[in-house]
Image: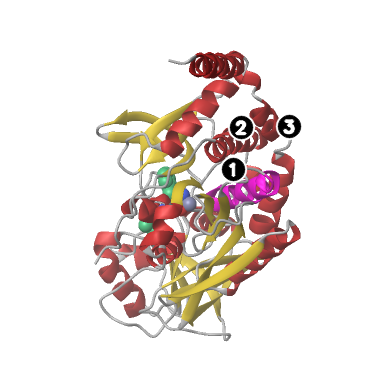
Amino acid sequence: MSGNGRRIAALAMTMVLFVSALFLGNATVSANASWDQEILSRVNADRALGHVRVLSDQIGPRVGGLESEKKAAKYIASQLRKLGYAVEEQPFSVPDQYIGYVQSGKEKWQVGASPEGRVTGKKPVSGDVIYVGKGLSGEDYAAGAKGKMVLIQYDSANRNEQLKRAVENGAKGVLFYNTVGSRGNYGPAFSPRFEEKVDIPVLGISLIHGQWLIERLEKGNVKVKVNTEHHGNLSSLNVIATRPAKTKNPHAPVVMVTAHMDSVVGAPGANDNASGTALTLELARVLRKHGPGVELRFAFFGSEERGLLGSRHYVNQLSDEEAGRIIGVFNADMVATSYDHVTHLYAMTVDGQPNRVADAAVEAGERLGKPVALGRFGSSDHVPFHQRGIPAALFIWMRVDSWDPLVYDIEKVYHTPMDTIGENISPERMQTALEVIGSAVSEVIRKPLPLREPLRKAG
Ligand code: BES
Ligand code: ZN
C-alpha cells in the first residue's frame, strides 16, 4: 500500500470509529432518543378524544354505505385538508342494508331490521309492547298479542318458529333482542334472517335495549314506534391522505397508518373504531413533517364491519409496483378501551410472526417502558395487506389468556350501544397507544428502507 493509500485507510478507520461511537452513544440514551421525544412531547390524547367525541357522540353509529359514514368521511377529510394533506376519497359499492329505528318516549335507537319483514319506510308502526320470552309455547302468548309489538328473546336455532308464532298470534311488529355476541360481548343489534317473508316489521335489537324494555314493562305500559328501511345501491368510501416524499421520488417507500371509520348498526363505536380513527388523525398531525425519504399515507377505511370491504378495495386497486412500495401498515382498531381486564397493547400479525411493523412497536414499547405484546389475530384491515405480502399489524388493547386454543378478553360493550366515550374510553390508554405507535412509525420512517420484491396480485 502506498503512503497515500495508508493515510486514506487510516482516515476511513477513524471515521468508522467516530460514526460507531455516535451510534453507541445514541443507543445508551435511546430511552431519550430525540425522535421519540419529538413524538412524545407532541401527541395528545385530549386532542384525539375531541375526534372521538365528534365521531361517536355527534355523528353516532357510522354504518358502512349509509349517510352517517359519509358524514364521518367528510369530517375526517376536512381535518386532513386543514393539516395540508392531499386527500383522496375512494368510493366502492357495498351490499344492501336493512335497518330500523325504535322510539320509546325520549329514547330513539338505531337497530337492525330483517329483510324478510315489512319495510315501513317513513311510515312508522306503533303499539304497546308485550314480552313473550322465547315465544315458543302457548303459555308465552297467554296474554294475547293481537295488535301488539311483540318482544322476543332471540333463539337462533328456533327463529323461524318464533316468528311464525308471533304472526299467528296477531303481532303488529316483532322486536327480537339478541342475548350474546360472538365474542362474549353483550348481544348487538342485528338483521335477523328467516325462511319466509312476513307482512309486519321485524327488528333485531341489542340485549341492552331488550333489557331496558323488559324493565320498563315491569312498571307498566310501554309504547314503541318503529320503522324499517331498505337501503340499496349503496356506496361506501375510503379517505386517504398522502404526504409525498420530500425527495419528490414517486417510487419512494410508503408507510401507512390506517383505521376503519365505520361502526356496526346501533353502536356509537367510540372504541371500535372512533379511537383508531382519532389516533390516526392525531398521528397525521404530528408526523406530517417526518421521514422526508418516505411517502406517508393515512387511510380511513369504510365498511370494515361489513367484511373488511374498504381495505380489500384499497389493496385490490394497487398495481404490483404500488403494492411493492408499501413497507409497513400500522392498523389501529380499538386502541383506547377503559375495560379493566385488558393487560396489553398488542401488535397482532395475521400469522403471529413478527414483521417490521410489529418489531418497531415492540422496540418502541421497550424504549418507552410501555410494553407491547406480539400476537396473532385477523378480523381487521391489516388482513388484506398481509395477504398481498405487505408487512402489517393490528394494534388493539386486550387480554390474552391462551393462544392455543385462543382465549382472550375484550370489553363486553364491544359492538353495542354502550360503546360510548363514557362507558368505554380511557384517555390514558389512548395516550399510550399514541406514544407507542407514533414512536414506532417514526422509527420505521427514519431507518434505511429497502423496497420489497412486490407480490403479484392474486388471480
Ligand atoms: N375491531 C374489530 C376486530 C376485533 C374485535 C379484533 C375484537 C379483535 C378483538 C373489528 O372491527 C371487527 O369487528 N371485525 C369484524 C370483521 C369481519 C366483519 C370480517 C369481526 O371480527 O367480526
Ligand atoms: Zn373494529
Q: Which residue is drawn at 69% across and 46% down?
A: 289
Q: Is the magenta stretch mostly helix, strand or loop?
A: helix
Q: Which residues, given as a range, are shown in magenta?
A: 269-289
50 left or right, relative to 394: right
Q: In this view, does 434 lie above or below 89?
A: above
Q: Nearer the viewer, mark 1 or mark 2?
A: 2
Circle 1: element type = helix
Give the amino acid type for the residue marked by disc 2 in the picture.
Answer: Thr
Pointer 2 with pointer 3, Cβ within 8 A: no
Q: Residue furthest front?
A: 2
Contact flag, marks 1 and 2 (Cβ < 8 Å) = no
Residue at the spot of label 2: 432
What is the total number of numbered labels drawn onto the structure image?
Answer: 3
Mark 3 element type: loop
Image quadrant in which the C terminus is located: bottom left
Q: Residues within 10 Å of mark 1 (few under 14, many from 20)?
A: many
- Under 8 Å from ligand 2: the CB of mark 3? no
Residue 409: give x, y in percent of width and height. Answer: 41, 36
Of marks 1 and 3, the one in the foreground = 3
Q: What type is the residue that disc 1 sits on?
A: Asn
Q: Is residue 104 above or below residue 54?
A: below
Q: Earlier in the sequence, mark 1 or mark 3?
A: 3
Q: Name the residue under label 3.
A: 41
Can residue 347 be seen here? The reply is: no
- Point out residue 110 in the picture as x, y percentages from the top left corner: 55, 67
Q: Quick one: label 1 or label 2, which is nearer the N terminus?
A: 1
* Residue 424: mark in rendering: 1
Badge nearest the viewer, 2 or 3: 3
119 w.r.t. 392: above or below:
below
